[in-house]
Amino acid sequence: MQLKINGTETEVPVAEDTPLLWALRDGLGLTGTKYGCDSGTCGACAVHVDGVLTRACQISLGELRRRGVTTIEGLAGAEALHPLQQAFIELGAVHCGYCQSGQLMAAAALLAQTPKPSDAEIDAAMAAQLCRCGMYPRIRAAIHRAAALMAESAR
Amino acid sequence: MSALVNLSRRRLLIAGAALGGSLCLGVLAPPARAGKSALGDSAPVALHAWLAIDAQGVARLLVPHTETGQGIHTALALALAESLDLPLAACRCETGFGPEFVVPELGLQGTLLGSSVAQSFERVRRLAASARQMLLQAAAARWGVAPETLRTEQGRVIGAASGQLLNYGALAADAARQTPPDVALSPYRAPTGSDPVRLDARSKVDGSAVYGIDVKLPGLLTALLLRPPRLGAKPGKAAVASAKSILGVRHVTEIDDCIAVVADQYWTAKQGLDALTVEWEQSAAQRHDSAKQADAHQRLLKEPGLLALARGEPAAQPPAEATLIEFEAEMAELAHTCMEPLSATAQVHADGVDIWVSTELPGHDAAVAAEVCEIPLDKVRIHPLLAGGGMGRRAHPQADFVRAAVMLSKKIQQPVKLIWRRQDEFAAGWHRPRTSVRASLALDARQRPQAAWLRIASAPVLPGTPFAARMREGVDPTQVEGLVDWPYALPQLRVSYHPDLEAAPALWWPGGGHLHAAFVQESLIELAAERAGRDSFRYRSDLLDAAPRLQALLQRLRRHARWGRPGRGRHQGMALYQAAGGAIAAVVRVRIDAGHWRVEDIHAVIDCGQVVHREGVVAQVTSGLLLGLSAARGEAVQWIDGEVQQRDYDAYPILRMPDAPAVYVELLDSTAPPTGIRELAVPVLAPALANALSRATGQRPQRLPIGASVG
């Protein structure tokens, strides 16, 4: 079926009951969205569906008719890097990196709703995103930094 | 001392490199391994690291270590840039593979049992310094001047006369004809200015980084496993027709004790798996049970055990009349659960086998694959990829997930990617073994430690691994490590090991035996300080007369953490740990709130030798401390009647952001060789936390995990 992925109408050559995660990875070769648990407990596969943070392992392709999906590959849009990606690099929030796509998508959804989040708001919004490397303090700092970068460029 | 060898004119098979016009240098690692060499007509040789400088002046370093997040590629690229005098932007570092690619400390290729930076730092610097000298000599020959009159500057050789300036790339082919000189190394100069970011950061934030699980090949199939309900059970009658009838399911086949469903993609394979009905033959099933194991450990600890370590002449048992501090630790079995699930892609073909995998032990995986395919070792090609965490789980004595992928590809004669689902890793065993320790510390009349007795029960992990020869008469050194570095004045120390040979299969875990060594040591010392009515820092410092660096570490931490001023309703606890040539001390600050404890912040000071990449070290220490917190807080694998109760993150709570404290790390300046970091940072956390909670609640945690609630 057809799906709008990262702004482009795309034919996805897998069955409609396929979870979005595997439609992306196996059907389209978009491997930036990561598999971690298949049960929605780790957050590694987080994407945006019409701008809403969604676990790609928990929604099937058939449920996505006429909806737009954004993955890590499309997070920056026309820019080279999203301010969050820039901040994650600058503040060393990257370690093994496997959870990063999900962290970034969750953080982007947060900043879209709450442009200047408090620590508590970040913790609440990011609680579902596991990082086995324990980069949490750096991810928290990077989200603050990205919020500042975005506020700066909005002025 | 390792020797350098000019490989420029040899037929290089390593990483498929064919680099005409390049300067290629290798570090030979003694002792050379027996066996046929892949370097063609050369003598058998063990290669530790390999450097090529091409005609464009780009330096490519191949090392035997896997990037699992620890930053090894960035650290070694920095060492290369510094000693070669080349901008970091022109330096690459990758994981190579070859039968000769050996880490001398391990005897094969792997990233395990110690620090990869410590193993490689000096060798890479010598390689780079030697290459730089060869470039200087090549320029000197071309200009007809003495090499001493020349200097290098960021990728160029510059002469005294005007116009004498050549890029490394233009000299590489000439330099390749030189004999590698042995150059005396100057002290390492860390990069000035702001710390460079990790080389792999960009690809990891834009989704383009390729991990083992991300491999794409034409015609690649995906395999999933249906695993027996208990270890040792075997498939009996299986109804496979409904699985096979699913469009896209290609094969349903037995692999060892599992049934594999092979399909054109993951989702189809998963549906095939769900459609299987299998009766399991369970007469040989193992019925591991954590509660029974805890009782068994208590029995084991009453037996004499095996003498693992003796300092002074301690009695076998603590004397009855001594003033004794007693401590009994029970530490639960721990799962690795790296974020990237275990996975391997294998393609068996007429000329051998290719394997794409995130592995920490490619040298061993290759040997296992050669055995499975009944082919010589040099017909196995491993393509090492980024790992989404390692933690030792990607280094398995039977190469479990790699072996299964190779067996499958051999069986179906097609390339196949085997993916272990999250539950597979939990159910398969091979976790950090449950560990019980009984410890006594005798104090003298001045309340100073006089003698300590430690009895350690756990499953040995080395038997059956490539490192089995390190076992010492039944004692697994990885289960009693760290205590040999007991830092405080202590005339007598006796450590006995009580091997638990009935346990579920066990594997290394970050920090190894240091986890229980640090927990027991620092709980005992804190108890002794309490008994003496002394401050935690002062009591320890007084026992470190012979260790001025440790005293400096403590002094630095005391200021850094504002010791003694925890703030209202907050409590501090500290711990010091020394191992593997380095040391760390940490203060944990906790707050009790509505029956739960929470860590507010962690301050740590580490002495880990020469710092190659400051930012990388701070990240590693932070990571280790929070892994220690995660484990001490809530991680436990529990077996009941042969079945692992935890199959996913909901039942195995690893640390999440709301429970992650701020972490402040300081590094002690040092010119000593770099040391490991994980064996310091992971172990120090639990005792520091326990000492804080003990102060906050009046109850001393002896069991790990502690759990999130108090009282």
Image (cartoon, rainbow, N blue to C red):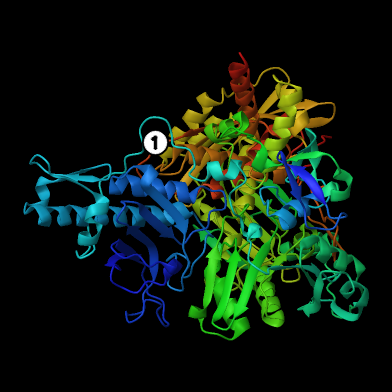
Q: Amino acid at mark 1?
A: Asp
Mark 1 secondary-structure assignment: loop
- Name the residue rendered at 51%, 30% in the picture: B557
Residue B322 makes an appearance in the image: no
- Name the residue rendered at 39%, 36% in the picture: B669
Where is residue B69? Give x, y as percent: 56, 48
Instruction: Write down the quadrant of residue B174 in the picture.
Output: bottom left
Chain ID, mark 1: B
Where is residue B297? Give x, y as percent: 76, 62
* Depicted B607 relative to depicted B411: above or below: above
Circle 1 sits on which residue? B669
Where is residue A59? Give x, y as percent: 85, 46
Please give left or right for residue B196 compared with residue B529 in the image: left
Q: Residues within 10 Å of mark 1 (few under 14, many from 20)?
A: few
- Label count reads 1
The residue closer to the viewer here, B653 or B254, is: B254
- Tell me the quadrant of the picture where the C terminus of chain A can be found: top right
* Depicted B438 relative to depicted B269: above or below: above
Please give left or right for residue A120 compared with residue B669 in the image: right
Residue A73 makes an appearance in the image: yes
Where is residue B166? Give x, y as percent: 19, 47
Q: Residue furthest top?
A: A155
Q: Residue furthest bottom?
A: B374
The residue closer to the viewer here, B447 or B295, is: B295
Please give left or right for residue B454 compared with residue B428 in the image: left
The residue closer to the viewer here, B489 or B4, is: B4
